Image (cartoon, rainbow, N blue to C red):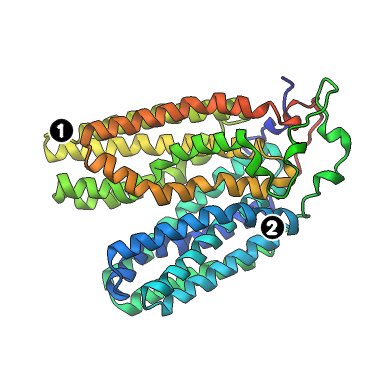
Amino acid sequence: MAHHPRSIVPSRRTPLSGSQRTLATAQLVSAIGDGAYYTSSALYFTRIVGLSPTRLGLGLAVAWAIGSVAGVPLGHLADRRGPRGTAAALALATAAVVASFLVVDDFLPFLVAACLYATAQSGLGAARQALVGGLVPDGERTAALARLQATLNAGLAVGAALGGVALTVGTRAAFLAAFTLTALGFLATGLILLRLPAVAPAVLPAALPAAKAGLADGTTADAPRRRDGGFAVLADRRYAVVTLVNTVLLLRMPLLSLVIPLWIADRAPQLGWLGSALFVLNTVGVTLFQVRTARAVTGLPSAARAVRQAGAVLLASCAVFALSAAPVPVWAMAALLVGGAVLQVVGEMKQSAGSWQIAFDLAPADRLGQYQGFFGTGVAVARTAGPLLLTTLLLDGGGPGWLVLGVLFLAAGCAMGPAVRHAERDRPWLTAAPTTATLAPTG
């Protein structure tokens, strides 16, 4: 197969461009708000508003289920209207929704606001990815996304600390201050995004030159033509398989935020503080090492390899967590939990770097928004189904449950390579004759 121009790698010392710095600033500001919200929202809605934990969980599950569906049409909107304006509008919409939480006093208003929040967040994720695709050269995208992910984690850590202050104070005013910080963060994010260069809306496929659909041997690809309808990604079964495989790996997301704290509370209540410490460990690890981990990903083959390695590392992580189910001293359990968490963050960083490259390289340039929106549904599914699935499997299943989850991670990691190679077959831009590609100037 001809070498694909998207695999060009910038120098490790390439400085951030102005656009990338602006994107990172927007990411940092919104992440600080998100960290404050995620840390304080559950206790606010249960203790201050008075929702039962069951109603809170139900409302969030419904909201993220709706959000998972909204990503594709809002991503399509970003393609057709331009990702900068769409992302800015959705950031401002998120600010307005978070502000509405300040006056929520019952379940129904909470449900409506939560659905709007999840919808805006899913759309913002898709539009922001399309914005990265439009502003960052092909060969720099994975590195840029790694920097943005590191920035995200740094912002979440700061926001979580501020949210922790609200939890410590525990008054209604303290919680409302945390929500106000979140709303102001997204308001600032929308304004910062408007400072970016405009990215032209995608050209409709019918207007593209006929040669664009030509393969290296002179034949034409009819598969993409059959998907030239509005939401083309919904008919792209091969991309759907890749997304499904990635979704399985994303089941790692609720582990540190939900399962591990419950696991510790059930087996070693005296280690209750360790749950927060492991979350901080994960955040700091991604902040420090995500960019370095992403350097190994330079194209689809290395991306699939990174995901396969992630599956193996996540299996090892689950095996270490499984050992903590044994009757061991408290210090040994703490050491096992730390070891499992370290392996998990390594697997997370490899899986993230590989999946970013895969998601972009398999998406047509004129439909980045809707394709990224579809790929991002894996996050919403993990948030919706993950808690119920993992608490049942792990808290009830104990050590064997951890091993089952680890094998599932390994199977998904190994399946990504074949799924990617299968998806490559009807991507004419991946099999086109090599062209000379030049990185855009940076700085």
Residue shown at the point (15%, 50%) measured from the top left: 269
Q: Amino acid at mark 2?
A: Leu
Mark 2 to mark 1: distance in Å? 52 Å
Asked whether residue 16 appears in the rendered view, the answer is no
Residue shown at the point (63%, 57%) measured from the top left: 74
Viewer-side label of 2, 1: 2
* Residue matched to label 2: 77
Asked whether residue 439 appears in the rendered view, the answer is yes
> Label 2's element?
helix
Which of the image's four quarters has the N terminus?
top right
107 over 410 or under it: above or below: below
* Residue matched to label 1: 326
Horizontal and vertical percent position of residue 24: 58, 54
Q: Amino acid at mark 1?
A: Ala
Horizontal and vertical percent position of residue 191: 63, 68
The answer to whether residue 163 is left or right of residue 319 is: right
Which of the 4 image quarters holds residue 156? Answer: bottom left
Residue shown at the point (40%, 75%) measured from the top left: 177
Horizontal and vertical percent position of residue 216: 81, 23
Horizontal and vertical percent position of residue 193: 65, 62
The answer to whether residue 281 is left or right of residue 304 is: left
